[in-house]
Image: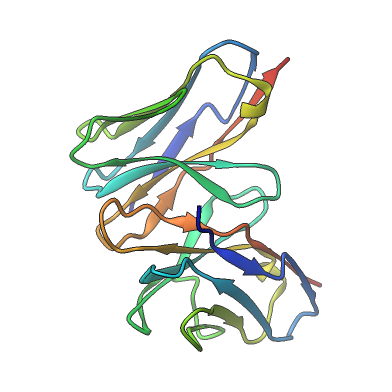
Amino acid sequence: KQEVTQIPAALSVPEGENLVLNCSFTDSAIYNLQWFRQDPGKGLTSLLLIQSSQREQTSGRLNASLDKSSGRSTLYIAASQPGDSATYLCATGANDYKLSFGAGTTVTVRA
Amino acid sequence: EPEVTQTPSHQVTQMGQEVILRCVPISNHLYFYWYRQILGQKVEFLVSFYNNEISEKSEIFDDQFSVERPDGSNFTLKIRSTKLEDSAMYFCASSSGTAPEKLFFGSGTQLSVL
């Protein structure tokens, strides 16, 4: 059974600093990996999806890398802003499209 | 951008009552899912649905749960006799089934069982 772990559980940084969020998973036979953003009491917004054959994906200030062999993914957020404050979830996808989620990293960006 | 719509946003019910949570997936999507998140816990998979039948379900999805696509647009989750431990945020999701298989999630229904 896939286990997804996210470290740290919480992170507080001043505005402008770069954020580094880590995700590890136990079963490297993944189909893809998605990073989501969750605001309090709200749904999940997909940020980036990395296919198993890819090493990274970029969207604006966000960059996600994937190292399948070591079971790790990292989400980088450049030049953080207070609006980036949220919980970030990592989820691995199997070939049946079922996702296994980590517990998330709650980010606070201080103005 | 198209989105997945869920109703209601909040549902309060008494233990033992039946509830139906409703979802309208993105119109050209073929795969549908229910996930739930108990407060303070991970988002967990409940069930996936394709071609009008369940393709996979978790251990959580016991006989008290059922899903249905009653027409071409709605996707519902029914809990027959709610328990206190069913209190959670329930998320509906859909995907097109073609690469990349990004899942699109709705904003959730917060179910409170009293």
The reply to whether residue B58 is visible in this rendering is no
How is the structure coloured here? Answer: rainbow
Q: In the rendered view, does A27 fall on the left or right side of B24?
A: left
In the rendered view, tell whether residue A60 sits above or below residue B30.
Answer: above
In x, y percent, where is residue A82?
Answer: 68, 22
In x, y percent, where is residue A36?
Answer: 49, 42
Q: Residue at x 21, y 47 (%)?
A: A29
Q: Residue at x 19, y 33 (%)?
A: A69
In the rendered view, tell whether residue B5 sits above or below residue A103.
Answer: below
- Label total for image: 0
Quadrant location of the C terminus of chain B? bottom right
The reply to whether residue A32 is visible in this rendering is yes
In the rendered view, tell whether residue A82 sits above or below residue A73.
Answer: above
In x, y percent, where is residue B61?
Answer: 49, 75
Which residue is nearer to you in this view: B17 or B94? B94
Q: Residue at x 27, y 45 (%)?
A: A27
Residue ranking furthest to the front: B1
Q: Residue at x 30, y 63 (%)?
A: B97
Which residue is nearer to you in this view: A83 or B67? A83
Quarter occupied by residue B24: bottom right
In the rendered view, tell whether residue B17 sits above or below residue A53.
Answer: below
In x, y percent, where is residue A1?
Answer: 33, 54
